[in-house]
């Protein structure tokens, strides 16, 4: 599908879901990609950590792809870069902080020399074919969050990326109302906008208010060891915690490799200028309890992160009865169970747990309705196109935008081809979209046979049968609830299989195989109520 004299938008990820953002703009025979993110595996993908958008469509058009422009460095916007950038074979554009984190990923993947990474300094405009591109800094929960102004022969796009409004952002200088109004004054065809917090009737709040909230909360716990868990990428929050450590007379201890990496990259880019020297875990444990402030990864319940290991007692940092853990982060949907598990472990040990529901210790990095309404009035687009949300978020934003006076709104989801200009904006076709998974070292279809079979096994268990044509049978099972009855089940199943072999001595190999499979499965169902997967191996000459 080669774009003609038109402006096309197509999301391959991030529209109809939160995360895994991959957006395409097409114009005059060329494509531009904005962001290349991933998401994390949930229960529907047993044994899988990372999930990607299926790029089959743009891979088939790679000779017309001009480049990848990254809005900011969150994993749902850059996490797939080391897995696909080399194959796509186009330059990647990013601001300095994002570029350094991407460079580290490419180095770790062993492809740093194979991918061209172009650092865009000082929001300097650049051109890629028919696209003129300029970064516009906006506040977000990471350093160098950016919108993109994309100029084309058919109109201007304001692509927000992830954003919020913040009068006291702590890190970075976001565009002012006057600067954003000036962009709107020049005329904007389409606002492509983050939908994450559209149901929030209030503004997201300022990082400056979090400073006051965290300072107040930490100051309350004299004589106690305090641990704060937050997103490692939130440089503004790290700046806040460093300042609070100094103000409260506590030494700062950092637990988590991702925190070490972010702090190093942030300092190299000129952020965290007054950040205190950190101490290691052993030093922290030697200090009086109220002389240390610990910052740790793992607020989303990640099993291998520092907080989970601390809660399990498998870390050099120890928390005792009366100590305090502050969850200075929002609970990402889908992570409720692992987060609750860690909080329960902490509570069982007598550790006090405080979340953003109890104290002003976190604000979102995404815009609530007042912020959306403000941006609409400043940019004044002809068309609103919601992205970065589940279907309910995007449909709600489309309705909200129209109620605020935007003339047109386009709802789309992954794989939809939307013509923005010329003519009436709307969907005109579809391309393949889907999900890929990183399964071990292999990138595979999320709906492939291996994952389908793994789900079945996880629900029903598996029984293996090895038999010979002269009637010798061996049955073994995994995942059936037959602890006390296992031996009796095996004996009966082996007897049933032997009878099936006897009945099918003159049958075809295929019919014999199916008879053995059914005999085994029926025995398992009688004994357990489960319908397991059955593996059959028949030895002998047919």
Image (cartoon, grey):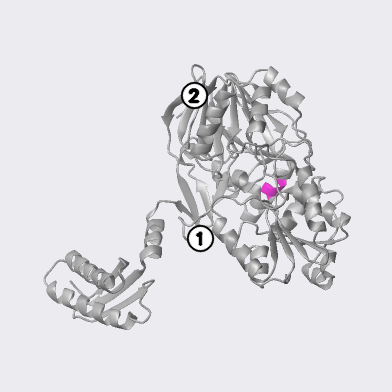
Look at the image and tell me in which quarter the N terminus lies.
top left
**In the image, residue 455 lies at what x, y percent?**
40, 59
Query: Is residue 319 covered in magenta?
Result: no
Taking 480 as reference, is 237 above or below it? above
Nearest the viewer among 200 and 332 is: 200
Which residue is pictured at 20% across the width and 76% down the height? 496
Q: Which mark is residue 462?
A: none
- Which residue is disc 1 drawn over? 440
Taking 244 as reference, is 390 above or below it? above
- Label 2 sits on a secondary structure element that is strand
**In the image, residue 15 lies at what x, y percent?**
51, 38
Taking 278 as reference, is 196 above or below it? above
- Which residue is disc 2 drawn over? 419
Camera-side mark, 1 or 2 = 2
- Label 1 sits on a secondary structure element that is loop
Q: Quadrant of residue 155?
A: top right
Magenta span of residues: 99-103
Q: Can the viewer see residue 296 in this picture?
A: yes
């Amino acid at each position: 599908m080669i774009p003609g004299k038109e402006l096309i938008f197509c999301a391959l990820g991030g529209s109809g879901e939160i995360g895994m953002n991959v957006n395409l703009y097409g114009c005059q025979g060329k494509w531009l990609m904005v962001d290349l993110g991933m998401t994390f595996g949930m229960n529907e993908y047993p044994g899988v950590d990372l999930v990607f958008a299926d790029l089959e469509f743009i891979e088939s058009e790679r000779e017309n792809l001009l480049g990848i422009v990254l809005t900011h460095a969150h994993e749902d916007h850059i996490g797939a870069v080391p897995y696909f950038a080399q194959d796509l074979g186009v330059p990647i554009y990013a601001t300095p902080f994002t570029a350094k984190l991407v460079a580290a990923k490419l180095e770790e993947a062993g492809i740093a020399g194979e991918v061209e990474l172009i650092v865009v300094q000082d929001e300097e405009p650049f051109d890629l074919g028919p696209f003129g591109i300029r970064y516009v800094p906006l506040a977000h929960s990471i350093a160098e969050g950016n919108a993109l102004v994309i100029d084309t022969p058919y109109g201007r796009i304001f692509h927000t990326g992830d954003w919020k409004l913040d009068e006291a952002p702590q890190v970075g200088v976001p565009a002012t109302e006057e600067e954003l109004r000036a962009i709107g004054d020049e005329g904007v065809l389409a606002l492509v906008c983050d939908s994450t917090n559209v149901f929030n009737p209030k503004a997201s709040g300022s990082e400056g208010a979090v400073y006051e909230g965290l300072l107040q909360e930490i100051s309350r716990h004299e004589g106690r060891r305090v641990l704060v868990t937050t997103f490692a990428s939130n440089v503004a929050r790290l700046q806040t915690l460093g300042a609070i450590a100094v103000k409260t007379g506590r030494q700062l201890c950092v637990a988590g490799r991702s925190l070490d990496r972010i702090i190093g990259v942030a300092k190299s880019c000129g952020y965290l200028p007054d950040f205190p020297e950190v101490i290691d875990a052993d030093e922290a444990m030697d200090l009086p309890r109220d002389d240390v402030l610990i910052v740790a990864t793992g607020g989303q319940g990640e099993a291998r992160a520092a907080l989970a290991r601390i809660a399990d007692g498998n870390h050099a940092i120890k928390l005792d009865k009366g100590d305090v853990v502050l969850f200075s982060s929002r609970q990402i949907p889908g992570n409720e169970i692992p987060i609750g598990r860690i909080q329960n472990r902490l509570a069982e040990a007598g550790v006090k747990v405080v979340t953003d529901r109890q104290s002003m210790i976190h604000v979102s990095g995404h815009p609530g309705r007042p912020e959306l309404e403000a941006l609409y009035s400043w940019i004044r687009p002809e068309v609103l196109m919601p992205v970065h949300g589940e279907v309910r978020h995007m449909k709600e934003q489309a309705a909200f935008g129209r109620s605020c006076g935007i003339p047109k709104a386009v709802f789309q989801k992954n794989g939809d081809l939307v013509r923005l200009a010329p003519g009436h904006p709307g969907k005109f076709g579809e391309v393949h979209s889907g999900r890929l998974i990183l399964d071990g070292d292999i990138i595979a279809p999320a709906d492939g046979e291996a994952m389908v079979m793994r789900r079945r096994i996880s629900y029903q268990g598996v029984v293996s049968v090895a038999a010979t044509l002269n009637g010798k049978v061996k049955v073994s099972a995994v995942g059936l609830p037959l602890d006390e009855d296992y031996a009796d089940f095996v004996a009966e199943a082996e007897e049933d299989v032997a009878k099936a072999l006897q009945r099918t001595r003159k049958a075809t190999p295929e019919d014999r195989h199916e008879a053995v499979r059914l005999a085994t499965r029926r025995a398992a169902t009688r004994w357990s109520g489960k319908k397991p997967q059955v593996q059959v191996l028949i030895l002998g000459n047919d």
